[in-house]
Image (cartoon, rainbow, N blue to C red):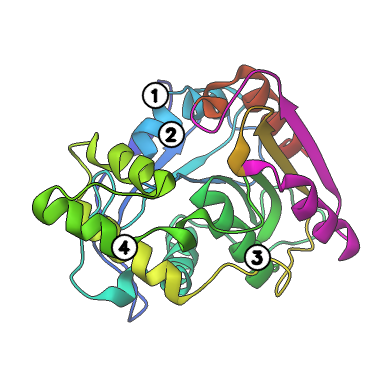
Amino acid sequence: MSGRHTGEMHSHTVEGTDPQLFVEVHDPQDDAGLRPVLLLHGFSSSSKLNWHDTGWVAALLEAGRRVITVDLPGHGRSGAPEDMDSYSPSRIRADLLQIAFDAGVRPLHNGDPSSGVDLVGYSLGARLAWEFGATQPEIVHRLVLGGPNIADPLAAFDLIAAQNYLADGTPIADPSTAGLLKMAMLLPSNNIFALLSLVDAIKAEPFDPAEAVPHMPMLLVAGDQDERAATMPQLAELGIRAGSMAEQLTLPGRNHTNAITSRAFKQGAIAFLGV
């Protein structure tokens, strides 16, 4: 990979932000002079799995973009705090804002293409990106939302069934819960109990995309085999009704698991953000 990257845990300067989050900042060899791109991975994944291993970081660096990645609490190389508040979407958004400032992101300024930040989020990361864009319009320039859903699938996660399965192997009746837990347990870097805390915290702050709608341009992307993203047109309509430019890109033959590896997804996102 070309460019410099730093993998140390960034020290936060605002009281209340989480110092356990693992952040990397990657600088391109040939800077295009555009704002940095912040990448937000999905539930039970990591920056390495979602963005490094799939070629996203390399493609963005090749396009001259500075890239910021972060592992969500309990994921990848981030810590697993014991307090529930560290996992709430509102707390994560506050940490993301501090991470952006730590990386040198400045408020948007007309005529300065290096100001602000672009966000790319996948699945849970798309939910976080939607809310971050809606609450931080002074710094967010454009959004790319992959595998988006108008309802948060984690809201229906059966926490008690998952806890019983982990305790004594009791089968999980709900196939969505069983699938998500199985996926989470496949990755040794995941802290399962921290991920369950994240689910619990998300349930306490349900996703209501109509309550706060981003007003910046957005690109919504999903595979045509992705049942979880079947409501993507409804999300786009929310954006359009709020005055946003909301484009949609459908990936033939792709599902929720493999859409992230699509070359068309990468190329579409980089072109959309390259303005």
Helix or strand or loop: what does disc 3 sit on?
Answer: loop
Q: Is residue 29 visible?
A: no
Q: Is residue 217 above or below residue 50?
A: below
Q: Amino acid at mark 1?
A: Asp
Task: Look at mark 2 in the image and give the residue it sits on.
Answer: 50
- Asked if the residue at tag 1 contacts the one at tag 2, i.e. Cβ–Cβ closer than 8 Å, the answer is yes
The C terminus sits in image quarter: top right
Q: Mark 3 or mark 4, which has the lower sequence index?
A: 3
Q: Amino acid at mark 2?
A: Asn
Can you tell which mark lies on residue 159? 4
**Foreground mark, 3 or 4?**
4
Q: Residues within 10 Å of mark 2 (few under 14, many from 20)?
A: many
Q: CA distance from mark 4 to mark 1?
A: 30 Å
Task: Look at mark 1 in the image and give the residue it sits on.
Answer: 53
The N terminus sits in image quarter: top left
Residue at 76% of width from left, 32% of height from top? 249
Q: Residues within 10 Å of mark 4 (few under 14, many from 20)?
A: some
Can you tell which mark lies on residue 107? 3
Helix or strand or loop: what does disc 1 sit on?
Answer: loop
The percent position of residue 139, horizontal first and vertical second, equals 65, 63
Q: Which residues are magenta?
A: 229-257
Q: Mark 4 or mark 1, which has the lower sequence index?
A: 1
**Foreground mark, 4 or 1?**
4
